Image (tube, rainbow, N blue to C red):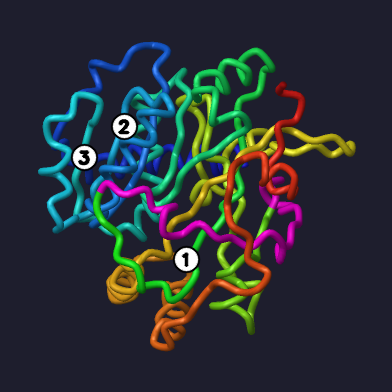
């Protein structure tokens, strides 16, 4: 594992040559700032609310990698003092699905910082997020000598057909997609990295009903007190060193955890899925997007009679989808 981690770090350094700075405001990053790192492509419509949400949560600086967007993303972000932006047209797949680029940026700018790594359609929630900023969480993690914090990816979806209600820039996507599966999840320990492996939810139910073992992984470790010797090894599902993946108890107790509300299923999803299928830049020969394409022609509804309407983090704690642990 030590050799694998070193290889990841070498890859990150090598891939740094693929990144061209568009706007570098990293000199404004202060020692205790909380950073957010994100790789994206053609997500400009999502950015207004995304930035609003995470600024209100307490993120101090955003490090974006734009992988060849053609929708005006760079123009939209230009001039924002808390945003640094890099552009690349290199292969997302050959960059470890963007992980090499982000490992590079974190190694260079995030040493000693708490860093949140999310996609533009993911919204991080944690215990007491309605009353406490993210710094309250990171301060508690520091005081508890905890270096990494897990969050289950929770797919949220509309009631009705996916494309029925148009999404507007700046709109909270949860106004449209606010239903989720409260059950239908499997969990196991991955012996290779020691992380948990979670699958299920509406994507397994709808798009991978015949092959649930091929459904997307829902386990993530998005929040880490970064060190330049760390590296993500498999998206944000697993980290190196392996000890960072120990985000769960093994003696019957519970560690605090959060959730990532995954707002993929808006009216933009069909076009996005087709674009990514044609690009062929995703994991496993884009098997996930092939499954989407095969089903989307039927204009499916993810909502079912067992769907539950999202209210707040306390609801997810009651359902066992996240935990406040001993953080009171």
**Label 2 vs 1, first from the N-terminus:** 2
Dot 2, how many residues are within 10 Å of its Cα: few (below 14), some (14-19), or many (20+)?
many
Residue 260 percent location from the top left of the image: 53, 46
Quarter that holds the N terminus: top right
* Residue displayed at 23% across by 31% down: 84
Could one spot residue 257 in this view of the protein? yes
Residue 262 percent location from the top left of the image: 48, 54
- Residue 158 got which mark? 1
Q: Select label 1 or label 3 by which is in front.
A: 1
Q: Nearer the viewer, residue 77 or 101?
A: 77
Q: Quadrant of residue 38?
A: top left
Are the two marked residues, 1 and 3, in contact with CB atoms closer than 8 angstroms? Answer: no
* Residue displayed at 45% across by 26% down: 228
Magenta stretch holds residue 181: yes
Magenta residues?
170-196
Could one spot residue 238 in this view of the protein? no
Instruction: Answer above or below: position of 253 versus 285.
Output: above
Dot 3, how many residues are within 10 Å of its Cα: few (below 14), some (14-19), or many (20+)?
many
Q: Nearer the viewer, residue 309 or 17?
A: 309
Are the two marked residues, 2 and 1, in contact with CB atoms closer than 8 angstroms? Answer: no
Q: CA distance from mark 1 to mark 3?
A: 33 Å
- Mark 3 residue element: strand
Check disc 2 and report the residue beneath it: 62
């Amino acid at each position: 594992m030590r050799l694998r981690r070193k290889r990841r770090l070498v890859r990150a350094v090598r891939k740094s040559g693929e990144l061209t700075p568009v706007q570098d405001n990293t000199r404004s990053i202060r020692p205790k700032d909380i950073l957010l790192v994100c790789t994206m492509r053609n997500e400009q419509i999502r950015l207004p609310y995304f930035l609003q949400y995470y600024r209100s949560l307490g993120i101090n600086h955003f490090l974006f990698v734009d992988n060849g967007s053609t929708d005006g993303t760079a123009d939209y972000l230009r001039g924002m003092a808390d945003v640094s932006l890099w552009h690349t047209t290199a292969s997302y797949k050959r960059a470890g699905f963007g992980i090499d680029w982000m490992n590079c940026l974190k190694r260079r700018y995030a040493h000693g910082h708490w860093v949140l790594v999310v996609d533009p359609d993911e919204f991080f929630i944690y215990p007491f997020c309605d009353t406490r900023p993210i710094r309250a969480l990171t301060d508690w993690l520091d005081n508890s000598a905890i270096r990494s914090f897990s969050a289950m990816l929770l797919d949220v979806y509309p009631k009705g057909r996916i494309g029925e209600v148009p999404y507007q820039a700046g709109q909270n996507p949860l106004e449209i997609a606010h239903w989720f599966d409260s059950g239908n999840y499997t969990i196991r320990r991955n012996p290779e990295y020691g992380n948990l492996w979670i699958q299920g939810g509406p994507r397994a139910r709808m798009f991978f009903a015949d092959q649930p073992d091929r459904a997307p992984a829902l386990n993530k470790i998005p929040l880490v007190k970064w060190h330049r010797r760390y590296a993500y090894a498999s998206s944000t599902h697993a980290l190196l060193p392996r000890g960072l993946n120990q985000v769960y108890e093994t003696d019957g107790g519970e560690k605090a955890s959060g959730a990532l509300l995954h707002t993929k299923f808006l009216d933009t999803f069909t076009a996005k899925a087709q674009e990514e299928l044609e690009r062929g830049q995703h994991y496993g020969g884009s098997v996930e997007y092939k499954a989407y394409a095969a089903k989307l022609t039927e204009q499916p509804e993810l909502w079912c009679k067992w769907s539950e309407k999202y209210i707040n983090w306390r609801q997810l704690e009651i359902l066992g989808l996240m935990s406040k642990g001993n953080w009171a």
